[in-house]
Image (cartoon, grey):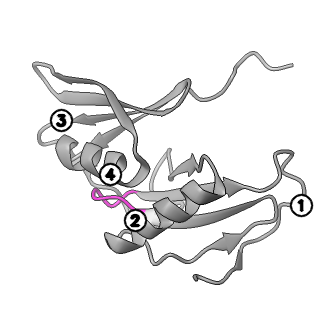
């Protein structure tokens, strides 16, 4: 038994809140459920699932609004991974990511899931995952698949 039911939200900083929300809404069809201009910052909440959200905040002059590019040197939170709703959604999002230049479209087979990597407008690395085995059996090192 576990005492939690999933990840509620991921809070992240962005250099440009509008650009951030436009990217995630345009590629992944995320709904903005809240947006506010507070005295010290702007922020929004984008729904990623029934009980999960992204919570970007734009704070003028904050040095963390732009991501560090190299994996495992990015700090406490290394990257964001989103789960595709279906194989069709995975293909559609992959196509959109390639069309906007955010991904090369390469698909990796990791046994229990497939993934593609993308870079958002702030330079944050992201991963889109298609789960192929809900029990996550047979996970292995990434093996490149066809990009077609």
Element marked by disc 2? helix
Asked if disc 1 and disc 2 are in contact, CB closer than 8 Å, the reply is no
User: Disc 3 marks which residue?
Assistant: 59
> Label 4: which residue?
26
Q: Which residues are magenta?
A: 119-124
Is residue 115 positioned above or below 104 on the image?
above
Name the residue tied to disc 1.
138
Residue 16 visible in the current orientation: no
Question: Between marks 4 and 2, how big is the CA–CA gap?
Answer: 8 Å
Q: Main secondary structure of the magenta part?
A: loop
N-terminal label among 3 and 4 = 4
Q: Please give the label number shown on residue 96.
A: 2
Residue, x 36% and y 48% (percent of image)? 24
Would you call the spot at circle 3 few (<14 residues within 10 Å), some (14-19), or many (20 or more)? some
Residue 2 in picture, x, y percent from top left: 80, 20
Q: Is residue 87 left or right of residue 9?
A: right
Mark 3 to mark 4 CA distance (whole Å): 23 Å
- Number of other residues with Cα within 10 Å of mark 2, as a class: few under 14, some 14 to 19, many 20 or more: some
**Mark 1 or mark 2: whose residue is earlier in sequence:** 2
Secondary structure of the residue carrying numbered label 3:
loop
Lower position in the chain sequence, tag 1 or tag 3: 3
């Amino acid at each position: 038994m576990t005492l939690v039911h999933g990840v509620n939200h991921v809070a992240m900083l962005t250099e440009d809140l509008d650009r951030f929300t436009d990217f995630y809404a345009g590629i992944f069809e995320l709904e903005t459920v809240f947006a506010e201009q507070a005295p010290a910052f702007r922020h929004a909440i984008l729904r990623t699932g029934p009980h999960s959200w992204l919570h970007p905040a734009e704070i003028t002059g904050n040095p963390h609004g732009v991501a560090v590019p190299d994996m495992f040197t990015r700090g406490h939170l290394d990257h964001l991974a989103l789960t595709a709703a279906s194989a069709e959604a995975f293909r559609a999002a992959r196509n959109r990511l390639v069309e906007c230049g955010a991904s090369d479209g390469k698909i990796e087979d990791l046994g229990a899931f497939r993934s593609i990597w993308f870079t958002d407008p702030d330079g944050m690395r992201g991963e889109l995952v298609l789960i192929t085995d809900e029990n996550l059996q047979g996970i292995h090192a990434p093996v490149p698949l066809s990009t077609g």
